[in-house]
Image (cartoon, rainbow, N blue to C red):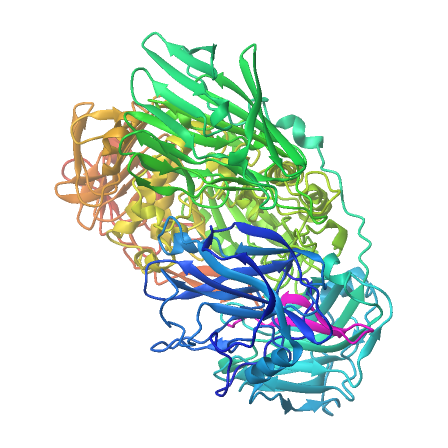
Amino acid sequence: MKRLALTAFLVIAFAAGGHATWEDLPPISQQVLLQEAELEVDAGQTWAKRVDVPSFSDTERPVLALRARVQTPPGGGCNVVLQVLLDGVPLTESLLRPRLLNKPPDFDPPGTQYHFQWYSATHQGWMTIFNNNYAGDWGGTGRDFEFLFDLTGLVDSGQLTTLSFAYLNPSIPKALKLDRAPLVVDRVTLGLMNAADVDRLRSEVLKGQTLTPVPVEPVLPPDAKPGDRAYEVVWSGRKESPPAQVAFDDLTGWTASVRGDANVSLAASVEHLLWRDRVAKLSYGGGKTATIALLRPPQPIPVSETFDAVNLWLYSAADRMKDRRLHFVALLEDNRGREFQVDLGSLTSGYWNLLHGVVDAKAAARLRFPVKFTALLIENCNVPDAQRAIFLESLTFHQQNRKPFATLETAGRAVFPTSDDGVLPAPPKNVKTSVTQLPDGAEFAATTPDSVLRFRVRPAKGCLHGITAQWNDGPECRPTDGGGITLDPLSGNPESAVCAATELKGESLTARWRLTQGTSTMEWDAVYSVHGRTLVVDVKCTGGLATGLAYGQVAGLPSPRGIEVPYLIVGSGCGLSIGCAAGLFVSLLPDWYHSDFSGADATATSPAGDRIGLMKGTTYTPLTDGRRNDLRERLLITVSPEFADTLPGIPNPPSPNRERLAPYAFYMGRASAVKFYTTLKRYGIDHLIASDFAAVLIDDYSEGFAGRWRPHPLLTYEKVQEFRRAIQSLGYMFSFYIDATDYFPLNEWFDENKVSLTPEGDLRDGWYGNFIIKPNAMPWLVRKVGERVKEHYAADCVYLDVHTNRRLQALDFEAGVEGAGMARPQVLGNADCILEARKWYGSTVSEGICRWLYAGVCDMDYASYFTPTPMSEIPPLVDFDLLKIHPLQHGTMMGYGPSAFFGEKNVGALYKDPGHGAAPLDFYRYVSASLAYGHMLILGYGYAPPLSRFIHYYAIMQGVQREYLTDTAAEITYHDGTDFLPTSRALIENSQKLGRVRVRYSRGLTVHVNYNAEKPWIFETDGRRFELPPFGWLIVKPGEILAYSALVNGQRVDFVKCAEYIYLAPGGAPASETPMESDGAVWLKREGDAWRLIPCGDLGTWKISNLPGLTHFCTDQELVNTPADRGCKRIILDSRALLGKPAGELRVTARNEAGETTTADAKVIEDGRLQIIPSATAVDYLLQ
């Protein structure tokens, strides 16, 4: 959040010396006690109160005193939690005139190595100590909990103002593993203090503080050679617009000073150029304490026109992954001499950056234009043991006069949704519904021949709090106990509302509530109906005073627990939890198709007694004009003994590319790796989507690869076309890259009017150095890029980076834009964008965190699922994926790569795998989970296993995936050690956690997976006994497919037999399965009427090399160190089982790397089978 705040400057650090204590403060007169008792503000919430500011004279200053802490168990700690707002504008700190008067701006908790500042410019909030009371001195200040602020210039004498306390960083309770960790505030007092006393307190805080001058060199070195101008500007011919008032091309008379011990200097430079022929190089680094640099022009620079935004162009040579981010503030002075600042935000990227800040309208109303620019302040200039540099180009103060891209495209919307049911769970076929009027409401019944579910709605108790549910004669539960509409803090308590009217009409009950506060009255209503086993609640409240809908807690069922559903990502938080208790499942689903919320919080709370929170609810955030959208919500409350009944529907069409993509493995690498792909093809990898991760577009990921189609200047169109032809000549699919969620400020089509705005009116930050494009402009950008890609190097597929990560969270809040402040248009605009991409690229793949929202609209995704506990440690619960997502699109493995599944720190076994001999256990963990969830193969993203292991992955997955990817799950069961149990029973009995999954597909394929780290799973099928070791599997389609990873004679053996090939991978000792025997991995593939034999026990390693003259991302790989026997000392084949011929009648042709005939060491052995001894020259053998 970056905007103007009416303060003088940012804080100078406190040095040893005098300071004000809480006890000996000067007197505060005309005190207004706003809150004496402890006030609790929960995570993400805001408290507000209107107050009349006491009238004050020129010799008095308005001040605010309070105590604040975060309620946690004792032990200390802190974080930026408290945000103080005055009329909606954050109270920020200043450099030369601190507003915090009773304690130093920095503190070092005793016994720790930490150094903190009380104010965070990044968050525009205040550090708050963790404790269970106001005792203690963890921070070592003697006044950890007390705050005294000078409000001069922020409030007007005798005028009404609104004071608010907001809870920043709402993830803190979860990080602390607490259900609640509220911000606690008390003794909130507004009053007046003598101006001389305020000045004295400030002097005490500033005592000993100095700004140290540092060198400024305005003259270029004699040998300075101009660097390249930003190539995007060269391409587009774009000119600077609007013109800058402050340029850094002439440093004559400029001064620079610092607070802190970092090494800082300023000098003229031509190393990196944008609009002008010279820039200012700020060199910085070293130091052990926080360092601030202040750059001043020779004289304040007039800004003659009014403005509401500020742009800063600069080039960064910082390390964005290691360094603490530089933070920039423009310092100004109005024509009354009142100083103020515009927060430009933090530097997040290398290369060219545009930092942007806005002038808050309420704060600007206190200013007198014209103004003058006085200085640029840069925080965090210390970089231990390193030196960095940035290059300042220009500062622009301008009036935005926005003409936003205002209409949401609907051209592609005919494709989805496929019904108006939204995410309504599918009702069981045999359920009949009815409604009966009650004296105090209505009863809705869902009846089958052997059951009845009753929802009772009693509006007098509230729109959600008054709902109960009962299954047969079981306990009556309250699925949304304590839930209901939430209001702006100044609008009153919704619990004080009265039910003004109810009406039962047809199959629906309508209720209305009225809340009167003083002379104002507001109303909201709800409509209830039942569909299957789901109570549908439609809530509406006009006027923009409703802040959301709280879902409350499920109460009244004994010993409830939450079941996290993989891939059911609703908003913030992990997968949505479904309640399980008393043999029932309960789900609370926001129907986003029929709701206008800004965000959904799926955070669950731990069970306590007979209560559990499944989801916090939804929120409505104000737009840039300060108004909220009217509340329009549909909540789906489902209760059933069947788990599947509680899962949401997905009203999307199936992908038209399911059949086309099913045989393929996806590889994310470099289009330049022609030699690598040629090797894969030579060794039998026939179906591959070769995707380029922007390697042809950029030379550094700090460059703006979003929305790009031109190759980097180091490449040519012809070179990219050459890569494409080579890949497609192998029979592979050529996949390109696009990101249309982000918007790089040097993009040839960049337009600030197409950038999403925060509620404060600032440009919404996206990927490092990028902004977030408006959802309604996303299809436009894809069309622009797609047209040109198709013209120059038409692709078969496109990777839409991060697109399907977009949650149910509004990102654009610009008033006047269709769908602003709503989550739904964000998803719909993104989905339209994905459909647009399919037109230009043929097929689409994306990252897939929120895959269920886009299933079928996108053709495939990475099936990424991130939880605090790595998904590798979670027993598979495959139902939502297989029943709802799988019929619409494909998912790849368990994310984009092993790190998505295991976590970044737990992938060593796979990355160190030499590729020969027994695979590491994590290989089987990774593959078995993928098979259980019905996913397809993905490799790459830095994980290019040795070729023998690459083939191992491919052979295990490809023949099976092409069968189940186009099929649907007919039955899902979990084995409890004795029997196969349907999902609902397995979840109720908690036996699903054993990890033994069986999936029957409708065309006859059956998948068994033993996802258990300790116990084998032994069973018989079709008269054969199988012992599945930890993370083993058995996959059978009678007469067509047999695939297993099982113990055979005490050792693990992997085997696949399908229509296209037969693959055997022994676990380190010879193994056999009809029709072959080997001591190393071997692959038999059909080649016309013949068979092709590929010894692949050990094929060596990859050697990576850069391609001269191209971007450093353009690399290739070649096979080296292949052992002569290829990891197989001998291979024995049963030719009668294979070809129906005796071995003596077979013709064996050995072929080398080039496909030319070479010597074959083959003979018939005593038992009539064929023996082949692999050699260094023979890649494969043709058996005819």
- The stretch of residues the image draws in magenta is 323-345
Q: Quadrant of residue 413?
A: top right
Does the rendering let one see residue 1100? no
Q: Residue at x 51, y 50 (%)?
A: 44
Rendering coords of residue 1171 (x, y %)? 22, 43
Residue sitting farthest toward the right? 304
Rendering coords of residue 167 (x, y %)? 51, 55
Rendering coords of residue 689 (x, y %)? 51, 44
Q: Residue at x 43, y 76 (%)?
A: 141
Quadrant for the C terminus, please: top left
Residue sitting farthest toward the front? 30
Residue 254 sits above or below residue 1012 on the image: below
Q: Nearer the viewer, residue 290 or 916?
A: 290
Residue 646 sits above or below residue 268 on the image: above
Does the rendering let one see residue 386? yes
Q: Nearer the viewer, residue 219 or 965?
A: 219
Residue 221 sits above or below residue 983 on the image: below
Is 343 magenta? The answer is yes
Q: Nearer the viewer, residue 720 or 407?
A: 407
- Relative side of 784 to 797, left or right: right
- Relative side of 1056 to 814, left or right: left
Rendering coords of residue 305 (x, y %)? 86, 66
Q: Residue at x 75, y 89 (%)?
A: 218
